[in-house]
């Protein structure tokens, strides 16, 4: 899934607000999200999801982590973030890109 700059910034905001990204590489993510990568882009951001914390720019975008990092709290956070990402993506229907 290729995102517009505005969509990528919105996604990064969700990750920052709900996945505990500190500092991070927002500029790199926004740039990568705007490029065509085949079926999806896998981008590691870590945060509260541990070293395996990733976002997959699919339709809709989703986050995940390594199974060994899964706890009830982490799984709840993943579900919450994935819901927010799905709702954001629904708002993009009809956008160019």
Image (tube, rainbow, N blue to C red):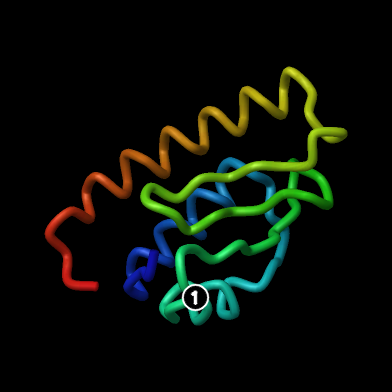
For this view, does 23 lie left or right of residue 51?
left
| Residue 22 vertical placement versus 91 (above, below) | below
Percent across and percent down for residue 68 are 87, 33
Percent across and percent down for residue 3 are 36, 69
Residue topped by disc 1: 37
- Taking depth in this image into account, of 20 and 41 the one nearest to the observer is 41
For this view, does 32 lie left or right of residue 91?
right
Q: Quick one: SS at disc 1?
A: loop
Is disc 1 surrounded by few (<14), some (14 to 19) or many (20+) residues within 10 Å? few
Residue at 44 percent across and 81 percent down: it is: 35
For this view, does 13 lie left or right of residue 72?
left
Residue 8 lies in quadrant? bottom left
Residue at 66 percent across and 73 percent down: it is: 25
Residue 85 lies in quadrant? top left
Residue at 24 percent across and 45 percent down: it is: 90
How many numbered marks does the figure carry? 1
Residue 11 lies in quadrant? bottom left
């Amino acid at each position: 899934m290729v995102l517009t700059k505005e969509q990528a910034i919105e996604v990064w905001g969700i990750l920052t607000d709900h996945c505990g990204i500190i500092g991070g590489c927002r500029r790199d993510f926004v740039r990568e999200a705007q490029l065509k990568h085949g079926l999806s882009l896998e981008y590691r951001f870590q945060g509260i999801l541990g070293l395996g914390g990733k976002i997959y720019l699919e339709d809709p975008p989703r986050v995940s982590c390594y199974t060994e990092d899964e706890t009830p709290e982490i799984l709840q956070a993943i579900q919450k973030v994935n819901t927010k990402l799905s709702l954001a993506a629904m708002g993009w229907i009809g956008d160019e890109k």
